Image (cartoon, rainbow, N blue to C red):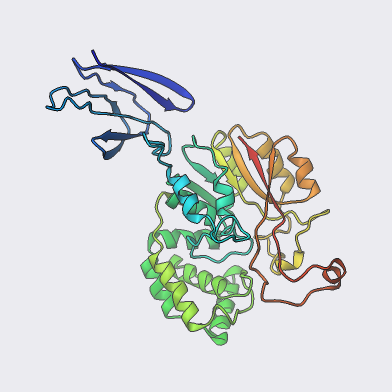
Amino acid sequence: MFHHTIKREYTNRCKTLLCSKKKDRTKYYPRTRVSIITYNNNKTTCKERDYIAMKTIYNDKQKNKQQTNTKEIFSSQYLFLSENNESSYKTNFLKQLASQNGSKNRYKRYLGSPLRYAGGKSLAVGFILEHFPSDIVRVISPFMGGGSVEIACSQEAKIPVIAYDIFDLLVNYWQVQMGNPQKLAEILKSFQPTKEGFQQIKERLKKHWKKEELIEDAMELAAYYYFNHNTSYGPGFLSWPSSVYMQEKRYHSMIDKVKNTNLNNLEVYCNSFENVFALYPNDFFYCDPPYFLDGDSKMFKGIYPQRNFPIHHNGFRHDVLRDLLVNHNGKFIVSYNDCQTIREWYKDFELVDVAWQYTMGQGETRIGLNRINKGINHIKQSHEVLIIKR
């Protein structure tokens, strides 16, 4: 008599289901969302349900007496390894993102986000995702920003993401981008990527920021924000225009990306990081907070010319974030600028050194006396560390 055993892996717990050829047995596990992969004569089928029927079938009625090989591999998040050790979505994505031909960066830039963002993690996506646990149900992000990691998680690794940011104009843009990218692209096409056009939109946006003349329509506000941000030097909020990104061909290429970026598996809301930690005390967190600029920080403060705005770095309570992370029940990964203060604060967690080359300001070849004395060129390297609670 054929006796087949299946081990079900779910949240570090294993259960065994035994089935015989005499009768198919079915067990139901309510309130458990898992994934099934069935291998039958090299044909693969996949179903996801909230109530999963687990089956193994032995078919001895076939003429060739070939056993139907059924394997079910369960995970709270991914379609994991098959009989041939097939990779998960995340692993496949990282393989595709890996640099070729001896590049200095281990991973290529991830281009999933339509938003340029100072301090964004488009070059760090691969480094960060490779440390994500394999058993997480979703990711909570209190600092959405440019969204490169969040988009890679939700779109490429198929991990649901709930993201937040304190900057309401940024959150409004993301909500419009997710809700109606085609309409947003149409409005952006009506704008002129010229110095005059840039100045007009900047002044209108500044009046909204100062609450002198509000832009009531969410779609219009998103278009104003995106135009000002993505065509600016840096980029930065209410910054000055960039001659590179206001080139007509480059500008229309950005509009096409807005139009063709359809995001699912991702939610973005406006809230403070303090409130977000209170809402999700047990979830896995990915945090990309503002840079710590005090003490022995190597980050050049001038790289963020708009840091005087409260939405940027000044006044950010790094100590509050530290306390929330230390007391958080769930796992987390934090990407921070590397300095002695940060290392001391998080010395009880795993610290992983990472490095990539920034593009912000790379066109500026002039260097100061400090770099001349140290024999350092104009190319800006990252000084970052990943803080991991596994």
Q: Specify whether 77 is left or right of 367.
A: left
Q: Nearer the viewer, residue 148 or 68?
A: 68
x and y percentages locating residue 302 in the rendered image? 75, 68
The answer to whether residue 274 is visible is: no
Q: Is residue 335 above or below residue 52?
A: below
x and y percentages locating residue 6 in the rendered image? 35, 22
x and y percentages locating residue 338 in the rendered image? 74, 51
- State the residue lying farthest toward the front: 64
Residue at image coords 63%, 75%: 233
Q: Quadrant of the C terminus?
A: top right
Residue at image coords 39%, 31%: 74
Q: Specify whether 313 is left or right of 98.
A: right
Q: Specify whether 36 is left or right of 200.
A: left
Q: Nearer the viewer, residue 386 or 327?
A: 386
Q: Nearer the viewer, residue 126 or 32?
A: 126
Q: Is residue 207 above or below residue 88?
A: below
Residue at image coords 58%, 48%: 128
- State the residue lying farthest toward the top: 1
Locate residue 80: give its quadrant.
top left
Locate residue 202: give its quadrant.
bottom right
Q: Is residue 134 above or below residue 118?
A: above
x and y percentages locating residue 46 in the rendered image? 29, 39
The answer to whether residue 319 is visible is: yes
Tally the numbered discs. Answer: 0
Q: Quadrant of the N terminus?
A: top left
Q: Is residue 197 above or below residue 157?
A: below
Q: Nearer the viewer, residue 160 or 121?
A: 121
